[in-house]
Amino acid sequence: MKAVVYDKSHRPIPLVLSDVPIPEPIKDEVLVKIAASTLNALDYRPLKMGFKFKKGQIFGADMAGTIVSCGSDATRFHPGDRVFGDLSDYGSGAFAEFVSVSEAALAPIPDFVGFEQAATLPVACITALQGLRKAGTSLAGKKILVYGASGGVGTFAVQLAKAEGALVMAIGSTQNEEMILSLGADRFIDYRKTDVMTSGERYDVILAVNGNHRLVAYRRLLTDHGVFVMIGGSLKQVMKTLLFGSLLSMGGRKFRFAAAKTNLQDLKTAVDAVAAGTIRPVISNRFALADFDKAFELAAAGHAKGKIILTMNQE
């Protein structure tokens, strides 16, 4: 089978498309024929930062596909079942034509949800879902600022917040205005034209998907009992939130960091929302697995709308 594997000698990115054996499922594993995967920051950011990996490691977290066979202890699924999941806690392996993974990583795909739609959900949608939960028990009627609304996480955050009854203000660039408003945002803010830091507006919740301002500046934008949730951005910004969040949370305003962790219940919540039409994945580009390098280049540039899809086994 074809797979995208780590090779530190390759440039400009240390990944190559290689022929590797199709794995055999053991114990509670199932063999999945992958139809689609998507790129996330956790796929390309460590490479940009110079992290090293085991030679031959197959990359990729998000995946959706069809079960081909099951290990001796697998009981949840059968051959022919359509499934999706996040493989980041199971050794990765989604950028390949097949993967053998514990059935515990996978959730069923309901009727009327396609492979590509399902593949967008495990990392990005779950990150948005869990990030919004960090803001409190109820978002209804609250004024929410989504900073970085046009990417994979941001597009889901806008829709999920709106579905909860929030008043959603979304920050992005001009070329993404129509798309962001079509997702239900009540107001679009072009960061090149409007400086939210000096606008005088205040928000009950700030969801920083890709924020790069000083934390004290965000604090001034919060209402007296507002909540700032960091779910993305630079490593430096994340570390500052972890180190100084408790200090900045003295008083009514709160600073929180959401480290998303996929679980089966949230996967079900996300895919059921797609099936019901409550949210819709935004897919900006599709690439064949053989063109993975072009997909990585686009993702690493940081200007893609929504999600970038890698397709496999689609006849």
Image (cartoon, rainbow, N blue to C red):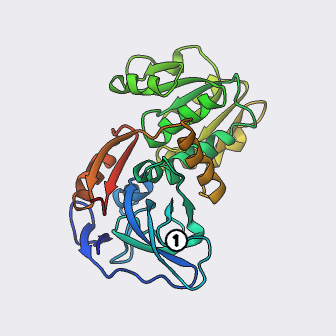
**22 sits left or right of 126 in the view:** left
Is residue 44 shown above or below 226? below
Image quadrant holding the N terminus, namely bottom left
Residue name at image x 45 percent, y 24 percent:
182
Q: What count of labels does the image hold?
A: 1
Q: Where is residue 60 in the image (x, y as percent from the top left)?
A: 40, 63
Q: How crowded is mark 1: few (under 14 residues within 10 Å), some or many (20 or more)?
A: few
Residue 46: give x, y in percent of width and height. Answer: 40, 60
> Residue, x 46% and y 20% (percent of image)?
189
| Residue furthest out toward the right | 251
Inspect this view and state whether residue 237 appears. Answer: yes
Q: Which residue lies furthest to the top in this view?
A: 200
x, y percent for residue 28: 58, 79
Query: 267 or 298: nearer the eye?
Result: 267
Residue type at the position of mark 1: Tyr
Q: Is mark 1 on a helix, strand or loop?
A: loop
Q: Where is residue 200 in the image (x, y as percent from the top left)?
A: 58, 13
Residue linked to disc 1: 90
112 to 162, vertically: above or below: below
Q: Is residue 209 visible?
A: no
Image vertical order of residue 257 relative to residue 76, above or below: above
- Residue at (29, 79) in percent of width and height: 20
| Image quadrant containing the C terminus | bottom left
Please tell me which residue lies in front, 169 or 230.
Answer: 169
Residue located 60% across and 83% down the image: 73
Camera-side residue of 122 and 6: 122
Answer left or right for 105 relative to 33: right
